[in-house]
Amino acid sequence: MKTDKELRELASQLKCPNGIKGVEVADLMNETNITMTLHSINQLNLQDNDCILELGHGNCAHLPYVLKQKKNLTYHGLDISELMNKEAKRINQQFVDRQQASFYIYDGLNIPFSGSYFDRIFTVNSIYFWTDPKFLILELYRVIKPQGMLNITFCQQDYMKQQPQTRFGFTLYNNAKIEQLINKTQFKIVFFDTKTEIVKSKIGDGFVDREFTTFTLEK
């Protein structure tokens, strides 16, 4: 059983990995979140020449999967973690060198791109940490092209409540809360898809059933 101090530290690392422990947490997140990440990517309906943005990319070990979906894709990643920015560049140096991918640090609110820049945007397991969800979604609306698609993939509230680290700095969501948030913006909900998987617990106590959902939105 982890102490509150240990759980608080884990929550902090999940939000913004840093230091040696941050590299370990990033590897764990990539391992445990890969099904969610691939699901979010698959639901994007990518087309040749699309320009893609991901919020909260972590170490971005999934980038090769993204870039092989269609021809001439370009990827941009935003993260609040300096460590994840460095790790993503290190792991994906070949794609950075070919100018197929670029990574940036941002403040968690302001998207540093001009309007109507991206064809597709996705984010996985980051929404719990958004300090101003409505503002950020409006920013995503601004930088996405007309008919562009945004995928928000998250774990359902009922599952998250069972994870003790979520008591520290997480905002939890279910479908109704996501719909309520989206309805405050001009995005249209195209569809949502819910899956259940068995994953390794982040607190190291075996495996758990996890229910997650991807909401697909259109400008």
Image (cartoon, grey):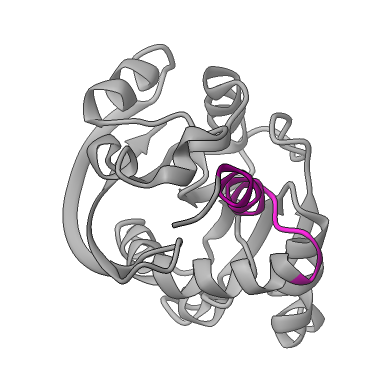
Residue 2 picture location, percent across and down: 50, 55
- Judged by its main secondary structure, the magenta piece is helix
Q: In the image, is residue 38 above or below residue 177?
A: below
x and y percent of residue 107 in the render?
Answer: 78, 36
Does 14 appear in magenta?
Answer: yes
Residue, x 70% and y 82% (percent of image)? 91
Identify whether 138 is placed above or below 106.
Answer: above
Q: Is residue 169 left or right of residue 96?
A: left
- For residue 33, say whether it is visible: yes
Which stretch appears magenta? 4-20
x and y percentages locating residue 161 in the rendered image: 32, 37
To which quarter of the image does residue 182 belong? top left
The one nearer the camera, 23 or 141, is: 23
Q: Residue furthest bottom?
A: 94
Magenta stretch: residue 35 in it?
A: no
Depth check, front residue: 173 or 101: 173
Q: Is residue 157 rendered to the left or right of residue 204?
A: left
> Residue drawn at (81%, 69%), measured in percent from left and top?
86
Count of labels in the image: 0
